Image (spheres, rainbow, N blue to C red):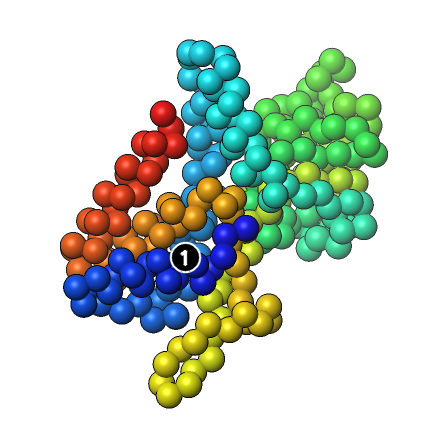
């Protein structure tokens, strides 16, 4: 977790240097959520990139371990009861629409058996294929198209999966505050404040990204370029 007030105060120090500008709590919360989502999505691009890159196995193993540590907090599983409650997406409600909190599915189960997740074309071909490729309860197949999850087992029947393993989206962050004498003061009340769910090592990059967005919003190129430059240096250091 990264403390949201710590990030906000650091951003204000950078932005207010030499009286460059002030970032309101409302603006900060918008920028903060954009920055968190951008960092979160980059995890998956980095994992894919390092998995394909040639080189020292030990180095890339370390990078993979580091990324896995950052991602694992967002990993979750919905069991049969929860999955059955998903909104129906066709086939009499058996096909399910993935909830908005799911970012990426990495495993689908039918009665504790792993479904082979196929692209739409391959899914349709396998479903109507020959005896060797035809799905069954012992070898179920799955497909996700336009946010709708489909699973097929015996007799080409669509079935509701019994388990969905996925990465959820980060919770929406919020710097909570109350106003005294027209000044916004930090409110630690958990009903008003939500901290970043990212790994503590992301604190510096969050500051730089938010600073970049703030500069663009205020039309201050010096702040935007400063934030972008610091962000680039930070990213280069992380990937060495």
Q: Secondary structure at mark 1?
A: helix
Find residue 104 and report its horizontal and vertical position in percent.
57, 40
Q: Residue at x 17, y 64 (%)?
A: 18
Say which of 107 and 142 sits in front: 107
Indicate whether 21 appears above or below 235. below
Above or below, comparing residue 200 to residue 134 in the picture: below
Can residue 231 be seen? yes
**Left or right for 120, reference 140:** left
Residue 22 shown left or right of residue 183 in the figure: left
**Displayed quadrant of residue 144:** top right
Q: Residue at x 39, y 70 (%)?
A: 26
Q: Nearer the viewer, residue 18 or 150?
A: 18
Mark 1 — residue?
A: 7
* Residue 219 visible in the current orientation: no
**Residue 238 location, quadrant:** top left
Residue at position x 23%, y 58% in the image: 215
Q: Quick one: which residue is furthest to the bottom in this view?
A: 181
Picture coordinates of residue 41 (x, y %)?
46, 41
Q: Residue 14 at x, y = what percent?
A: 27, 58
Q: Quadrant of the C terminus?
A: top left
Q: Is residue 188 left or right of residue 114?
A: left
State the image quarter where residue 157 is shown.
Answer: top right
Decide: few, some or many residues near mark 1? Use Cα within 10 Å; few <14, some 14-19, many ≥20. Answer: many
């Amino acid at each position: 977790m990264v403390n949201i007030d710590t990030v906000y105060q650091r951003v204000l120090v950078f932005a207010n240097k030499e009286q460059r500008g002030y970032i309101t709590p409302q603006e900060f919360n918008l920028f903060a959520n954009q920055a968190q989502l951008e960092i979160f999505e980059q995890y998956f691009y980095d994992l894919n990139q390092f998995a394909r890159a040639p080189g020292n196995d030990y180095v890339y193993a370390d990078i993979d371990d580091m990324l896995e540590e950052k991602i694992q907090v967002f990993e979750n599983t919905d069991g049969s009861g929860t999955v059955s409650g998903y909104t129906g997406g066709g086939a009499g409600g058996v096909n399910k629409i993935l909830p908005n909190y799911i970012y990426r599915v990495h495993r689908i189960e039918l009665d504790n058996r792993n479904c082979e997740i196929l692209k739409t074309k391959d899914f349709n071909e396998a479903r109507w294929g020959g005896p060797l490729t035809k799905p069954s309860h012992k070898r179920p197949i799955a497909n996700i198209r336009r946010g709708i999850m489909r699973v097929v087992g015996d007799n080409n029947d669509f079935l509701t999966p019994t388990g969905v393993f996925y990465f959820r989206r980060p919770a929406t962050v919020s710097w909570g505050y109350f106003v005294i004498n027209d000044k916004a003061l930090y409110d630690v009340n958990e009903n008003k404040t939500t901290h970043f769910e990212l790994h503590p090592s992301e604190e510096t990059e969050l500051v730089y990204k938010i600073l970049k967005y703030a500069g663009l919003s205020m039309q201050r190129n010096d702040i935007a370029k400063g934030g972008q430059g610091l962000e680039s240096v930070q990213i280069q250091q992380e990937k060495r």
